[in-house]
Image: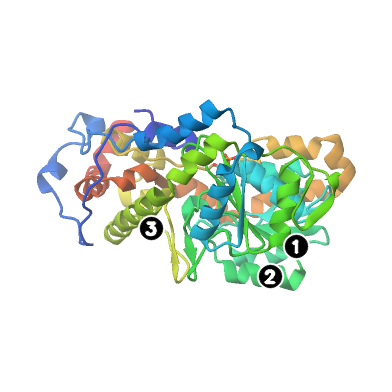
Amino acid sequence: MKTDSSLTRRGFIRTAATGSLALGWLGSQQVAPRVFAAEAAKPALLGGTAVHPSGWAKWPEWRAAWEPELLQVYRSGRWFRGSDQRVAEFEQAYARLLGAKRCLATASGTTALTVSLHVMDVDAGDEVIVSPYTFIASYNAILSCKALPVFADTDPATLTIDPASIASRITERTRAIMPVHIFGMPCEMDPINAIARQHQLAVIEDACQAWLAEYHGRKCGVLADLGCFSFQESKHLPSGEGGAITGLSEQLIDKCDSFHNCGRAFGTNHGTGYFTRGNNYRMTQAQAVILKHQLDKIVRDTEIRQANADYLTMNLRQIPGVTPVRLPENSRSVWHLYPFRYDAAQFHGLSRDQFVRAMSAEGVPCGGIYREQYYDGLLDEAIASRGYRRLWGAARLKAYRDSFQELKGNQQVCATTVAMTQNMLLAERHDIDHILEAIRKIQDHSAALVKALA
Ligand SMILES: Cc1ncc(COP(=O)(O)O)c(C=O)c1O
């Protein structure tokens, strides 16, 4: 199985979602047993026996019970959003699940973000403060508004945006803050909302990995002006492609509805016909059928992932050199990925890439996930473009490019994070023990691994 720390998150998720394991009883929290016989064996990378050769739950999962309604949609010829009620039914059910006043389904998470930014009046020449530690779509949605993604730093303890680093990034052009609940871990929203109120900025949650995550007793997606979700194939609520915008304001969601539907008048956003700018970002009936059928499933799956993640966290704390993340007080992550910080010094200098290779050989795929993507070229391309040079001028764009070096927390996070995919958290407790066993085995044999891999 190919797993190296530079794999993209989606490539890594596809690679990890192999094999098949029945879901089962998870048992109560307890400290994992140490399996001394297995630990004594050589690491699989050095010819020993893999700790977990049987694979992990396949993802996405399909249920035959969803098929009759899906066939009915296709046979009816009513495929487009406006031809039937299924998209609206999904929207109502998802809004109820989240405690949102309204939900608007979209074609993808990226389009949900693009619509939300437009509706919150992010325009050409504006700046949006965003977390750098995220999937590239968070950057791209801002760039598609011809706005500048300005990066606050990442807190190495939480992997989310450091609220203390936001204020210094605000300029007269800043229009919005876009915190990302990465891997399903809620951002520290109270201080973020307080800064936004103080400077009259909009807040758009990128909750594309955070279905049902909770902060201070409320679900992600209803913690700010608008919240955006993705239902792409790898996600906990998948429909191939798909997305949603949620919120507590009828007016804002009505505006989102108009913009995502070619600018057609909708609800409180009324006019004659296509009276505002817009685009076609609509969801189809078939996508809505698959999503509707998974709403009970995601609640059950989330509980299983959370129980297994709690168990992992408790046991990883006992292993030197492996640090689980800190969540905000009174919050619940949903673990789209389960991350920890890796300290090579506690593994005789075994590099993160070598650790990841050794884990994969044990049958426990993991990866380094996000790089410092602001050096990947897309921002250089944007700021070299005629439009950006016209909108900002050379001096501001040079200062912007130079400011990436200040992202020390993010640099650290990109270099030391290791994460496993959500499907692994759906396994039975004895399989979760294999994850711990593999880490301990690699640590016990890290000196030999360093020597062999030199
Ligand atoms: C954090 C984050 N933001 C935005 C997106 C974009 O969602 P989509 O792929 O549905 O366009 C994703 C999807 O992976 C994501 O993980």
Name the residue nearer the viewer: 284 or 306: 284
The quarter holding residue 278 reads: top right
Q: Which residue is mark 3?
A: 324
- Mark 1 touches mark 3? (CB < 8 Å): no
Amino acid residing under circle 2 = Ile
Image location (x, y in percent) of residue 209? 51, 49
What is the spatial separation of the Cα atoms under label 2 and label 3, in whole angstroms? 28 Å
Q: Looking at the image, which residue is at 21% across and 34% down? A: 50
Q: Which residue is mark 1?
A: 170
Name the residue nearer the viewer: 161 or 344: 161
Residue 56 shows in the view: yes
Q: Looking at the image, which residue is at 16% across and 44% down? A: 39
Vertical position of residue 5 compared to residue 114: above or below: above
- Mark 2 touches mark 3? (CB < 8 Å): no
Amino acid residing under circle 3 = Pro
The quarter holding residue 190 reads: bottom right
The quarter holding residue 332 reads: bottom left
Mark 1 surroundings: few (<14), some (14-19) or many (≥20) residues within 10 A: many
Q: Residue furthest left?
A: 37
In the rendered structure, the answer to whether residue 85 lies left or right of residue 149 reads left
Vertical position of residue 73 compared to residue 90: above or below: above
Q: Looking at the image, which residue is at 58% across and 66% down? A: 189
